[in-house]
Image (cartoon, helix red, strand yellow):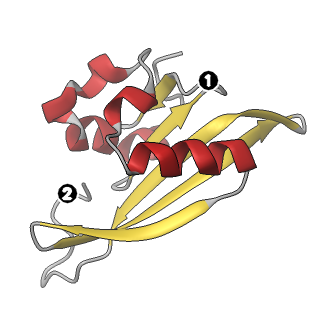
Amino acid sequence: MTAVPHAWIREFRGAITVCDPDGIILEMNEAAIRSNAADGGARLIGTSVYECHPEPSLTKLKDFVARGVPNVYTVEKLGVKKLVYQSPWVVDGRYAGFLEVVLVITDYEGGIPDGT
């Protein structure tokens, strides 16, 4: 699975990354691809999300996945503040993996630049 089927998801300004239960990246929208360009962008699809996270984020990610609960936090890099929402997702009531949505929350006059 590589294509994001709905235009609103593909073009949504927040970065969306979807993983299977083993942490393999299934889908990334355009903002996620741009946001992760330095690490391979779209080439990350099909690889392990665990390989993209250094410690201590790797341990935190594995912990939230094991517990099956959302993990929400903010981070600031280069003066840009972001809200990170990581959550399990289900299909027909069964655990299907986890996803991450990253939204820029820094105030900018004239709007958010590109959302990543």
State the image coordinates of residue 69 (x, y, percent, origin top left). 71, 56
State the image coordinates of residue 41 (x, y, percent, origin top left). 24, 28
Q: Residue at x 64, y 43 (%)?
A: 65
Disc 1 residue type? Asp
Whether residue 65 sits left or right of residue 10 in the image: it is: right
Res 109 quadrant in image: bottom left
Location of mark 2 (residue): 114
Q: Residue at x 53, y 35 (%)?
A: 18
State the image coordinates of residue 108 (x, y, percent, origin top left). 16, 81
**Residue 6 visible in the shown view:** no
Tag 2 secondary structure: loop
In space, the residues marked 2 and 1 are separated at their CA atoms by: 30 Å
Location of mark 1 (residue): 22
Residue in front for this viewpoint, 11 or 25:
25
Q: Residue at x 40, y 20 (%)?
A: 45
Q: Residue furthest right?
A: 93
